[in-house]
Amino acid sequence: MSMQGPKTREYFQRASKVMPYGVNSNFRYWGDEDTLVVKGGKGAYVWDMDGKRYIDYRLGFGPIILGHGYDAVVERVKETIGNGTVFAWTTPLEIEVAERLTRMTGNDKVRLTNTGSEATMHALRIARAYTNREKFIKFEGCYHGQVDYFMYSTASANSRMLGSRRSPISAATTSGIPLGINQYVLNLPFNDFERLEETIATKWHDIAAVIVEPVLGNAAGIFPVPGYLEKMRELTEKYGIVLIFDEVKTGFRLANGGAQEYFGIKADLATYAKAMGNGFPVAAIAGKEEVMMTIQPGAMAHGGTYSGNGVAVAAAAATLQTLEEEPVIETINKRGQRLMDGIDGILNDAGIPHVVTGAPAMFSLFMGSEEMPTDFRGYLEGDGDLYEAISMELIARGVQPDSDGREPWFLCYALSEEDVDYTLNAFEESVKAAKA
Ligand SMILES: Cc1ncc(COP(=O)(O)O)c(C=O)c1O
């Protein structure tokens, strides 16, 4: 059965005539029958063109930390933009955002940009300039945006990790990347102490950076095993490698100070986007004084016409203020924990082998085994089809997680206890329907 009602279908067909596959990002295409067109959202809900309401656990792939159309954010943006949005000078709002961000995350300095991809791209350049080295380590299943350098062995559709765990082969996730780029990328399985140690010990003189999603936000929220991030920090420090925490998904979601606060580990650089602006396009590269000051006018470039623009900084200022002044993460964690526990119980009662992965603010499910996957290869051994079947039943009932378990369930502050109750009831029915 199609997810589209008649009006949604009509709009999707119109979109397909003028946009490849009817979407502005490949990740939004679920096939011709199941790609939605959305009229809008408010709080924890979105409505499609037929007026069907969904409790939204995709939240635009994570940015909506407060809720759709959150009043304090919308008002701040409205107040600001009448006064102009780009000046090619610094504005007081940029200063406010930089002060809030550094205070909340413990980074010394920050530069703003617009998207996560821009942030990671600049972070890698800074690391290369700082170390005067060119290669970098990333981890299988980690996604760091649409930058050519990072589009290897990501958790994208059809992904299959190549080579053995012992000697993984970096595989381009997309056509269109020059072959030569591969020589700069070292992809390792996550949570493998031995591979990390051996790779760094033998190749450190070429390695500028280790970039990691501290929690695999694009691979079911797989967690680092105890001591792994600490080992990463120890080795990068020892060999003068820049440690980049890509906090585009974990930032302002795991904690106000992101994964650095959550795990008590200080990276050299961290990238933020998503939850920082509650759905407005704003991002940041932040880090230690010495590394950030590699940026140098005329010598080491960071720039962008829209970096720190009025729309972005107004949204970020209001979002960060709300996060600082209200119990946002605490509330989300409470509701998320109820969901995780409830779902766990329902799957246990149904006799479906599974583990609940991730953290309450961004959790997922691994099905087909009781053993927690520790890397993306492990995740790929699960039962993705069963997960998808249950998700599609949920969506039919007005509860919308992603149909792909790699994408976590994201929660926002606007999600109520009643929404959690509704979701758990729908989940129970969906499991029964999927099993049938
Ligand atoms: C961890 C991570 N880094 C970077 C990005 C890229 O961010 P953007 O889509 O804003 O370019 C994403 C996007 O999902 C992400 O999850």
Image: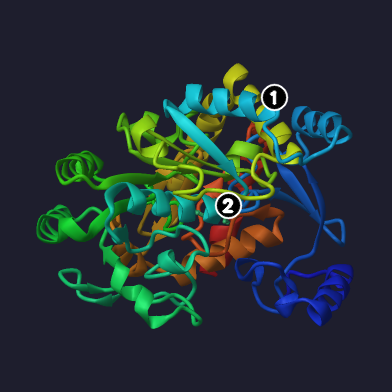
Q: Is residue 404 left or right of residue 87?
A: left
Image disc number at residue 168: none
Measured as percent of width and height from the top left, residue 168 is found at 23, 72
- The amino acid type found where label 2 is placed reads Phe
Badge 2, how many Cα within 10 Å: few under 14, some, many 20+?
many
SS for callout 2: helix
Q: Residue at x 82, y 78 (%)?
A: 18
Is the residue marked 1 within 8 Å of ligand 1, measured from its CB? Answer: no
Q: Is residue 415 left or right of residue 350?
A: right
Q: Residue at x 55, y 61 (%)?
A: 432
Q: Is residue 206 left or right of residue 331?
A: left
Looking at the image, is mark 1 or mark 2 earlier in the sequence?
1
In this rendered view, identify the residue nearer to me: 425 or 375: 375
Residue at mark 2: 427
Measured as percent of width and height from the top left, residue 370 is found at 29, 56
| Spatial CA span between label 1 and label 2 | 47 Å
In this rendered view, identify the residue nearer to me: 349 or 95: 95
Q: Is residue 40 above or below residue 97?
A: below
In this rendered view, identify the residue nearer to me: 337 or 298: 298
How many numbered marks does the figure carry? Answer: 2
Residue at mark 1: 92
Q: Is residue 172 above or below residue 357?
A: below
Q: Residue at x 66, y 36 (%)?
A: 415
Residue 429 in sight in this render: yes
- The amino acid type found where label 1 is placed reads Pro
